[in-house]
Image (cartoon, rainbow, N blue to C red):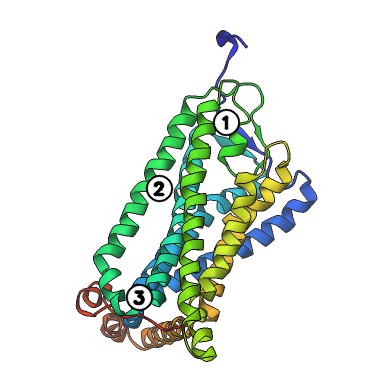
């Protein structure tokens, strides 16, 4: 195609999960319920961890960040799909598409690498319990999470800059329910080889490398568990990793299928099904997986519910009682962070 005949698309058409109008009502109700559960579940975990001083440890610090990332990842994709179904519009502007793609990859990278950091935390806690507080210091945990935010921002911005140089002409229909990178790279009428090479490099850095680190961490954890003399002790030690291991299998099982599947084999249906798993299903299930087997977290959630109920009851009596009780019920994370020594938690995580 000659350059004079190329016209850059100003918008894209998101075909969604289904092209049958009679299925859209069911999809709207299903994803609305999933999104509400995702928001409530992850925000409750963040509130429970931030308000309970007993949970101000590296393990729960990483879990709070994971819950925040899951909440943002679902918020980046699901609400736009719900709005499109409701207003019967499937269009998204070029700038909004790139913005959505930036945040999707930003939080997706965070999600992937943060799980490797959590696996390393479990490795240190089980293999080197006497040095746990020294190794996993507040400073190191802050640097790990802060560096991860910077790294994710850099990679996502590079994706957007490489995408912005492409020219989209002709077909602007995207067989997806949000602006994902791989389907978008099939639409330009200019060369996308640089983009595809960068996609492979990033996949190696943020999917393959963290997954290998997780496998290595759990291999060392397994060796340490085998050294525990009693069967009950081995079971209790392994239970501290069971929840994290479950979400790792759920997350990487879906993302690996999309990233490693050849384009000649992967259909749009498979891509959308996998995308639903790691943008909607996994963020919704994570709070349940982490809380159901964790006695400390369940206790913190019960305490949070009791405090909220008490505050509501006091508010109905007098506004003055609410103002007096509120600061006492909600502890300061910063004060506990600075004053309380970080301890290894033996909760079932």
Foreground residue among 327 and 61: 61
The residue that label 2 is drawn on is 152
Q: Which residue is mark 1?
A: 11
Identify which residue, 75 or 83, lies in the foreground. 75
Mark 1 vs mark 3: which is more N-terminal?
1
User: Is there a contact, CB below 8 Å, between mark 3 and mark 2?
Assistant: no
Give the residue at x 48% y 62%.
Answer: 216
The Cα atoms of the two marked residues, 2 and 1, are separated by 26 Å
Q: Residue 313: x and y, percent?
A: 41, 88
Measure the alpha-carbon separation of dots 1 and 3.
54 Å
Element marked by disc 2 = helix
Q: Nearer the viewer, mark 3 or mark 2?
A: 3
Looking at the rendering, which quadrant does residue 130 occupy? bottom left
Q: CA distance from mark 3 to mark 2?
A: 29 Å
Classify residue 146 as left or right of residue 239: left
Of marks 3 and 2, which one's residue comes earlier in the chain?
3
Left or right side of 273 for 63: left
User: Depth check: 321 or 105 in front?
Assistant: 105
Element class at badge 1? strand
Residue in view at x 31 percent, y 64 percent: 141
Position of residue 232 measured from the top left corner of the image (x, y, whole percent): 53, 91
Q: Is residue 37 visible?
A: no
């Amino acid at each position: 195609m000659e350059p004079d005949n190329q016209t850059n698309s100003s918008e894209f058409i998101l075909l969604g999960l289904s092209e049958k109008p009679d299925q859209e009502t069911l999809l709207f109700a299903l994803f609305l319920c999933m999104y509400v559960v995702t928001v409530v579940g992850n925000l409750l975990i963040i509130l429970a961890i931030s308000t309970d001083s007993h949970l101000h440890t590296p393990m729960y610090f990483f879990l709070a960040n994971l819950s925040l990332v899951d909440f943002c990842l679902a918020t980046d994709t699901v609400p736009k799909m719900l709005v499109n179904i409701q207003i019967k519009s499937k269009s998204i502007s070029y700038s909004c598409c790139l913005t959505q793609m930036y945040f999707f990859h930003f939080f997706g990278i965070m999600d992937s690498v943060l799980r490797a950091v959590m696996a390393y935390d479990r490795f240190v806690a089980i293999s080197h319990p006497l040095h746990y507080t020294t190794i996993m210091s507040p400073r190191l945990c802050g640097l790990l999470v802060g560096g991860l935010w910077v790294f994710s921002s850099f990679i996502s911005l590079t994706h957007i800059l490489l995408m912005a140089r492409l020219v989209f002409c002709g077909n602007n229909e995207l067989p997806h329910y949000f602006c994902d990178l791989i389907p978008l790279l099939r639409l330009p009428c200019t060369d996308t080889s640089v983009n595809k090479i960068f996609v492979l490099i990033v996949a190696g850095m943020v999917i393959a490398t963290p997954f290998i680190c997780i496998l290595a961490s759990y291999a060392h954890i397994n060796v340490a568990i085998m050294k525990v003399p009693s069967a009950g002790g081995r079971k209790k030690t392994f239970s501290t990793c069971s929840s994290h291991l479950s979400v790792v299998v759920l997350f990487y099982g879906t993302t690996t299928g999309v990233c490693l599947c050849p384009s000649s084999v992967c259909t749009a249906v498979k891509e959308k099904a996998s995308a639903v798993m790691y943008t909607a299903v996994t963020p919704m299930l994570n709070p349940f997986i982490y809380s159901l087997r964790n006695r400390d977290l369940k206790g913190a959630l019960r305490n949070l519910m009791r405090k909220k109920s008490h505050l509501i009851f006091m508010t109905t009596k007098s506004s003055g009682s609410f103002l007096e009780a509120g600061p006492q019920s909600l502890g300061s994370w910063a004060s506990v962070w600075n004053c309380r020594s970080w301890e290894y938690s033996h909760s079932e995580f």
